Amino acid sequence: MTNPSVREVLNQVRDEFGPRFVAARVEAENEARRLLDARAGRMTREEFVELGSAFNRHEVQGVVKLNRFSPAFTGYSILRATERIDELNDAMRVLWGPSEPDALTLVGSVLQNRSELHGAGSSLLTMMMYLRDPERFGILINATMRGLRVATAVDKPYSARSGEGYARFNDELLAWRRTWEVAPQEHDAILTALLRASREDGGETAPDPVVDPPGPLGTSPTAAPTTSADVARACHLPVETVDDWVGALMEGRLRQAFFHGPPGTGKTWVARHLAAHLASSPEHVRLVQFHPAFSYEDFVEGLRPEVDPGSGGLTYTVRPGLFRALCAEAAASPDERFVLVVDEMNRADLAAVFGELLLLLEYRGQTARLPYSQEPFGVPENLLLLGTMNTADRSLALVDFALRRRFHAFGLRPDREVLSHWLKAHDDPSDLPLRVFDLIAERVGADPAAPGHSYWMNSDDAATLERTWTFQVHPYLAELWFDRPNRLEELDREVGLLLGEGS
């Protein structure tokens, strides 16, 4: 990235956050230091959460927010680390103790072998080093490491796996900050913006798209969203809504949710962008679409026939399904986070597909013996599951309540504001899509199966909108109003007149 581009992004970020960009973060960091001075080494779980909340606090144009980093940074990470709170307090005595060399030695040791400190990962450890001396230490999170690589145009990625890797990151971060006169409190936001700008420009350092199984599964996010604001921007939603979803998944007991709503409300689009944000890497996202023939054997495990090369006869082998395979991958990398997106979740017989997972999803850490392999199996904490359910599909009424209560339910409704925001973002001067949406919404009324806004998020051209009505929305309403054909005929005439006026 060229120097003028860096300066442009830097100025944009400072304008976005406002005059108290640095000052508000300094105040929040000092509050965290006061808590550590008073309680380091003997903190309760509630005090660790308070520490994380203080560090995560900042201001945007004078409005206090608790999302300097992803809520998972100081929510899920701290809750997981405090599962062994005595062990964590022992580490805090060193990390906040008088000897900086001892603190760095501990950081390097845990980075190299994460099992030494349960759940700490790299962010919590390096947050403590940053609080010790923000002029010399940074925080190891993916967005800042990738952003610094963009800013410095280096070939070698930064590593969060050793003390030497952390030292290199700190040295090059300090050199970059000095070059551009960037305060410690603003470097993370600026580096994140540089990373985002490089992706939009097609930069080579952008990670690969979300990896899906083969097949016509729709459009993936072109790059993993680094913040909840990225998700909100891509989905044209309030960032507070996205923060609430992330908080429910990362800080509560349930690590699974489904998006429900009528067709055209963007359920799959939102789920995939949220998954890309929650996962620690784009490669850790999987997507599958359920259908009536999908079974427990496909999802968890089952017997599969194989031809014996010697006799030519059939033998049967236990094969793991996609969910069990992903659980094994997640369990092998406890410091990473994985997300499975299940599209059209209620199209399958869920009670049959999930089996004992109904228990294991709710009680992470417990195990059950699987019927085919007879092996113990549990769902790891670092695997999240997001589903989508179509409320216009009558099979939703058949979803087992035992399953429903084990999932957060995130509702998406037809939303005029989302469509309006999309039109503004695409510089579409016409309000014709909004007028068509309003007309249909008024005629359909409060029906929970009302068609959503995303049908009209394609163009403001009257011809394109007419094709959308004729080939997508009209057939859908014909099925919905099969017993009210006169009502559809009247709406068809009204839509035709409106589109004729706008053509």
Image: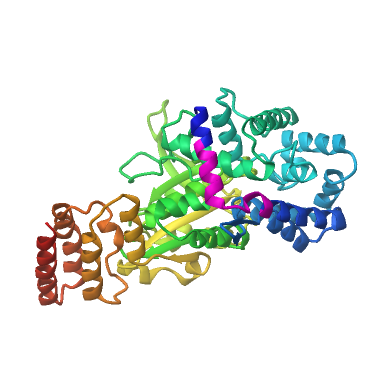
Q: What span is in magenta? A: 8-24
**Outermost residue, top side:** 155
**Outermost residue, front side:** 19
Task: Name the residue located 49 percent from the left edge and 31 percent from the top edge.
Answer: 4
Q: x and y percent of residue 438 in the render?
A: 25, 69
The C terminus: image quadrant: bottom left
**Outermost residue, right side:** 98
Task: Answer with left or right where residue 111 lies relative to residue 246.
Answer: right
Task: Answer with left or right where residue 228 lies relative to residue 57.
Answer: left
Q: x and y percent of residue 31 in the render?
A: 76, 57
**Which is more toward the observer, 70 or 354?**
70
Task: Answer with left or right where residue 109 lies relative to residue 460.
Answer: right
| Camera sees residue 105 | yes
* 92 inside magenta stretch: no
Q: x and y percent of residue 266 in the render?
A: 35, 57
Q: x and y percent of residue 385 in the render?
A: 50, 54
**Which is more toward the observer, 209 or 364?**
209
Task: Name the residue located 43 percent from the left edge and 59 percent from the top edge.
Answer: 237
Task: Answer with left or right where residue 201 lies relative to residue 152.
Answer: left
Task: Name the residue located 54 percent from the left edge and 31 percent from the top edge.
Answer: 150
- State the image quarter where residue 347 is shown: bottom left
The vertical placement of 226 against 53, above or below, is above
Chief secondary structure of the magenta span?
Answer: helix
**Which is more toward the observer, 60 or 306?**
60
- State the image quarter where residue 211 is shown: top left
* 19 inside magenta stretch: yes
Task: Name the residue located 22 percent from the left edge and 54 percent from the top edge.
Answer: 460
| Camera sees residue 356 | no
**Which is more toward the observer, 8 or 222?**
8
The vertical placement of 397 against 205, above or below, is below
- State the image quarter where residue 51 is shown: bottom right
